[in-house]
Amino acid sequence: MATIVDGRKRVPFLRGMLTHYLLEQGLSFQEAYQVADRIRRNIQRQKTVSSRKMIDLVHSHVRDLFGDRPIGDGIFWAPGSKQIMVEDERGTRPFSREHLSHSLTITGVDEGQAYRIAEWIGADFIRQEKTVVSRAGIRKATMNLLGKEYGEEFAERYRIWNWFRNREQTRPLIVLIGGTSGVGKTSVGVALANLLRISRVASTDEIRQVMRVMIAPDLMPALHASSYMAWEHVTAPPPDAVDAVIHAFHEQATRVCVGVRATVERAIQENVNLILDGIHLLPDLTGLEAYEKDVLFIRTNLYLSDAQSYAERFETRGREASRRPQHRYLKYLDQILKVQQYILDMGEAHQVPAVENLDLDETVQTISLQIMDMLRKEARGVGGRSGA
């Protein structure tokens, strides 16, 4: 990103800032954005641009594209632009394109498209000379623009998400992300929590860690080893025709799922949304059926189909956490893949969707769309359409 040098001031060039300035000078959004985008491409390899050069660039590009148009002095980085305020029951605050664009990504549009929509809506308010807008007005403008530019399906997702986020919740949303070691469950869970603004995130590894402190190894040996190594610590042989790795993993998961149920019960009691990830979230063991009427559950299993992908993940994990060396995981890769297949088989038997986690953003978007579909059904069931 180039920096504008104006005397002692150094201001980063922001396309949105220039777009906003040109809107105030009377250009349409498309015109303003075209100028700002063209200038950004022109200077993207430069570290600094003098204020004089930047002013010349603004005037010359406007003139090249649209002829002689009055656009003021061209000093778009100086304070003094019009401020749009958002008014609600909590008071007033500045309109934030960043906040709006973040909420738009839940509909399935990418970050670049989302920010452009937010800029467009802000520009519309400026053209209408609105200095104060309501949140309902922002939602209406956003849904209209989404429907027009991207289709009614995107507008419907945005409406449904706002309905769920702003209603008096009767049931919390709990997202369960399963999968074997190294598949990226925690990264996906944290990214999804940021997207959905869910503050409570937990993992079954944390639950197992607490249980390990409370229960001695000689009482539950499988609890005190990693899931793919538990078979080495179980003294009793598995039943006939049962794989030793799966038998020990199943025993460990059975114990940990006691803590999973307690974590879910706490979320229900406090009526808070929760993202819970872990290798132990086997649908036949979690015993969450009793809570179906009290919770909106989303279940997903992550997987990797290529052993090389696991090796690369474990290499990254080894660099980031010295106590989790790569060679330990690679030594047990066959066991890890065996556990993965068992998780996927159990998931398929219980209709849990499986997502190959090759790209973090794609995976998060896939799960978010799964959530949107579930919330759409929930809204119809409780008359959500009237609560938009």
Image (cartoon, rainbow, N blue to C red):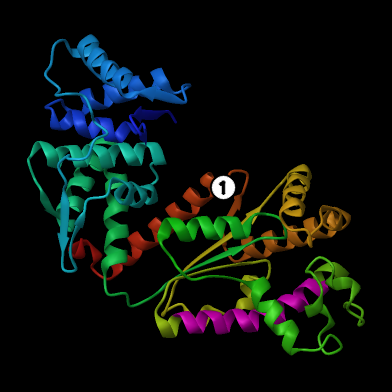
- At 22% across and 40% down in the image, what residue appears? 79
- At 43% across and 25% down in the image, what residue appears? 48
Taking the magenta stretch, the answer to whether it contains residue 250 is: yes
**Residue type, mark 1 in image:** Leu
Residue 110 visible somewhere in the drawing = no
Q: Can you say whether 35 is above or below 386 in the image?
A: above
Q: In x, y percent, where is residue 148?
A: 22, 37
Q: Report the residue marked by disc 1.
A: 360
Quarter residue 295 falls in: bottom left
Q: Nearer the viewer, residue 169 or 215?
A: 215
Quarter residue 42 falls in: top left
Q: In x, y percent, where is residue 157?
A: 32, 52
- How many marks are shown on the rendered structure? 1
Q: Nearer the viewer, residue 327 or 274?
A: 327
Dominant SS in magenta = helix
Q: Which residues are magenta?
A: 247-267
Quarter residue 109 falls in: top left
